[in-house]
Image (cartoon, rainbow, N blue to C red):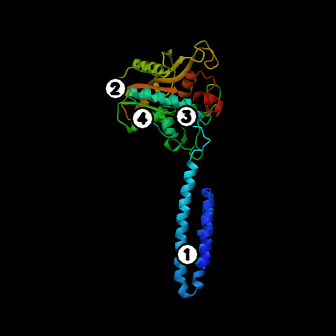
Amino acid sequence: MKDRLDAILKDGEERIRAAITIAGLQDVKALLLGKQGALSDILKEIPKLEVSLRSDVGRAANELKGRFTELIEARREEINIKASEISPDFDLTVPGIKPAGGALHPITQMCYDLNDTFRSMGFEIFEESDITSELYAFDNLNFPPDHPARESLDTYWLAGHDSGCGEKRLCLRPHLTGASVRYMQTHKPPYRFVYPGRAYRNEATDAKHERAFFQYEALIVDRDFTFSSGKIMISSVLSKVFGRDVPVRMRVGFFPFVEPGFEIDMGCLVCGGKGCSVCKQVGWIEIMPGGTPHPNVLKAAGLDPMEYTGFYVNIGLDRLVMMRYGIDDVRLFRSADLRFLQQFR
């Protein structure tokens, strides 16, 4: 038995020294110390030996196991050190290859820029879930019961939750405006906050429209806030985002949740106001609705419309990015075309 142990020791030492990779060393460890290894075979035979020999053989086997463990760990450290050494042929003076780096998606970057701009004006950032209910998407926003936006031709109602009405009827949010009421119900006035996010509508896609798109809403509610202050806010935000003054105009428009309501346009920066496919050859592009929150919306939020007023805008974030970079098709943002995305690195 002593001769067998000596032979195992000699063979094991040679195998450990010959191992040149961590994986190879693991194989040697399994061969020597594993359940089916050479030492395990010795230990299995101990009960068959004479009683007087068992303790000596067991002690020798355990000492051999400790010896192998030390040799294996030492060899492991040697392999790791050698693997980290710089090759003699490696020239440290040769310039390296710059690894490919990523970048923020242009819509994400625009959202961050708007966040910074509104924070500098004292606004809070608010977010909510992409799933909302008929109560917050329509009822609280003064949409009449027969409004076409409530139909499945416009709104994505969730299967299994598309019957009934109010809070139990769930959908993908068709706009962010319902978040305004949710925020006001859980905070104390006055309010000055923005809420960016994605909206979903069941509509045909073209160069200016997508089924899933980003919006960026802002709302101020206070006891004394003039409408002219809202217009100044719009001009200030656009000037900050684009780094220059941007032409802005406001046209009368109807939206159930504001009174009065306006369509807010900016001069098309793709064509410089000369007319193109993005602005439909008119030189202006609609980027947001806006106006004073409707009294019924303020009532839904638990406010007295005789005491509070304010100003609301819903910025079409995708279109704003199109203006910043001169992009003529909104569908490019979600095309996953790396040639397009690499322009913004």
Question: Mark 4 belongs to which amino acid?
Answer: Ala
Q: Residue at x 62, y 65 (%)?
A: 14
- Secondary structure found at label 4: helix
Q: Is residue 226 left or right of residue 327?
A: left
Q: Position of residue 343 (x, y in %)?
A: 60, 27
Task: Quote the CA–CA distance across marks 2 and 1.
Answer: 88 Å
Q: Residues within 10 Å of mark 4 (few under 14, many from 20)?
A: some
Foreground mark, 2 or 3, reads 3
- Which mark, residue 61? 1
- In contact (CB < 8 Å): disc 2 and disc 1: no
Q: Residue under label 2, please give it.
A: 223
* Local SS, label 2: loop
> From mark 4 to mark 1, how far is it between C-alphas?
82 Å
Among the two numbered marks 3 and 4 on one chain, the one whose residue lies closer to the N terminus: 3
Q: Residue at x 56, y 27 (%)?
A: 318
For label 1, the SS is: helix
Do we see residue 315 in this rendering? yes
The residue singled out by tag 3 in the image is: 199
Residue 129 % position (x, y): 50, 40
Question: Mark 3 or 1, which is nearer the eye?
Answer: 1
Q: Looking at the image, do the residues carrying marks 3 and 1 touch, with CB atoms under 8 Å apart?
A: no
Task: Judge by depth and name the residue closer to the eye, 215 or 156.
Answer: 215
Residue under label 4: 300
